[in-house]
Image: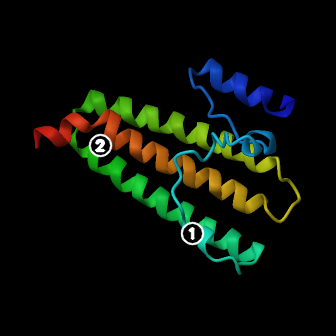
Amino acid sequence: MLGMLPVVLLLATQGITPVPARTSSSVAHGQDTFNAHRTSLPCDQDPHLSQAGLNECFANEAHAAEMTLQRTYNHYLKLLKDADKKNLIEAQKAWVRYRDAECRAYGGQFEGGSMQPMQYDSCRLSTASQRNKELRNDYFQMYDQQR
């Protein structure tokens, strides 16, 4: 946990609250806070996938989630006035810095292990899915209702 302290402090100075990563203790007690919103994935369905197969599957799922997020972001960016566009662009840049730091920290817990890529991409998948949900439900719900 002390290894993450500089990242947490950096994020806190930017007004960003990090999402807590799951630990073996929290998972054992049914408190998997990191992936609480994640739905079942094809990666989870095949018990015969090797670790390399899981790594590839999660990388593909993370990429797909990030492409969906990019489409959502671009869609709503077109609807905003210039000043609001600037604010959203600034917020998205801050979110990307947060995502990168969070996923490096989370994946770093598995440094040197064959699961590290899967854990890193699991974080990318989770954060991209959550950000897409935020943009669609929280930030821009009013735009869709007015159309």
Residue 80 x %, y %: 23, 36
Asked whether disc 1 touches disc 2, contact meaning CB atoms under 8 Å apart, the reply is no
Number of disc labels: 2
| Residue closer to the observer: 106 or 100 | 106
- Which residue is the site of mark 1? 60
Q: Amino acid at mark 2?
A: Leu
The quadrant the N terminus occupies is top right
Residue 124 x %, y %: 59, 52
Left or right: residue 36 compared with residue 144: right
Question: Which element carries disc 1, helix, strand or loop?
Answer: helix
Q: In the figure, residue 18 lies in which quadrant?
A: top right
- Considering every residue shown, the one lying at the far right of the view is 112
> Badge 2, how many Cα within 10 Å: few under 14, some, many 20+?
some
100 shown above or below 86: below
> Badge 1, how many Cα within 10 Å: few under 14, some, many 20+?
some
- Which residue is the site of mark 2? 77
- Considering every residue shown, the one lying at the far front of the view is 29
Q: What residue is shown at x 71% (from left), y 81% (from top)?
A: 48
72 shown above or below 140: below
Q: What residue is shown at x 63% (from left), y 77% (from top)?
A: 46
Q: Quote the CA–CA distance across marks 1 and 2.
A: 26 Å
In the image, which disc is placed on residue 133?
none
Q: Amino acid at mark 1?
A: Asn
Q: In the figure, residue 138 lies in which quadrant?
A: top left
- Considering every residue shown, the one lying at the far bottom of the view is 48
Q: What residue is shown at x 32% (from left), y 43% (from top)?
A: 136
Question: Which element carries disc 2, helix, strand or loop?
Answer: helix
Residue 52 x %, y %: 75, 75
Q: Nearer the viewer, mark 1 or mark 2?
A: 1
| Residue closer to the observer: 7 or 113 | 113
88 shown above or below 107: above
Residue 79 x %, y %: 21, 41
